Amino acid sequence: MNYLLKDCIAKFSRLISDAEEKAKSSSEAQDLTSTQISYLETIQEIENPNITELAKALGLKKPSVTVVIDRLIQKGCVYKTHSDEDRRSSHLHLTEIGKQINQRHEFAHDYLVNLISKKLENHELAKLNELLNKIIN
């Protein structure tokens, strides 16, 4: 049974990777790593965090996050603004390029949802959603 599950997960993982590569190749994300794209997605999800908040959300240490953010700033995907409450702190924002990359990444997610939705009945989709949430949480 574990072999069958492993094989299924490997195939599904390739499907996800292919969808994300397709989205990457059709945007300015071509030279970004999956990690960098994940950072952009998280910045958007938690709405302009500071480095500490982003590190906490990603489960990483601030110095590691700072290195990736500096690269994303160099690539024109992110910019910083000083906090109004604490001038020592900066908030991270997506540039238009960063927003476009996130939109393309969202396209990959939508592609997978459509693919899965075409092959499963509504009750199967509900069960899949339930099971995935159980695994994630």
Image (tube, helix red, strand yellow):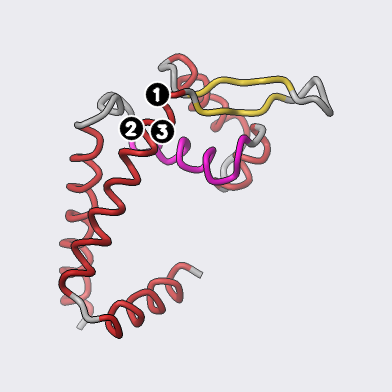
Instruction: State the mark number for residue 97.
Output: 1
Q: Quadrant of residue 125?
A: bottom left
Instruction: State the mark number for residue 33.
Output: 2
Q: Is residue 37 left or right of residue 88?
A: left
Q: Is residue 77 left or right of residue 120?
A: right
User: Residue placed farthest to the right in the image?
Assistant: 85
Q: Alpha-carbon distance for marks 1 and 2?
A: 15 Å
- Residue shown at the point (52%, 40%) measured from the top left: 44
Crowding near the residue tagged with mark 1, few <14, some 14–19, many ≥20 C-alpha atoms within 10 Å:
some
Mark closest to the chain's N terminus, 3 or 1: 3
Q: Which residue is mark 3?
A: 36
Crowding near the residue tagged with mark 2, few <14, some 14–19, many ≥20 C-alpha atoms within 10 Å:
few
Q: Is residue 58 left or right of residue 26?
A: right
* Type of amino acid at the residue the image marks with label 1: Ile
Q: Alpha-carbon distance for marks 3 and 1?
A: 13 Å
- Residue shown at the point (18%, 62%) measured from the top left: 115
First to last magenta residue range: 34-48
Q: Alpha-carbon distance for marks 2 and 3?
A: 5 Å
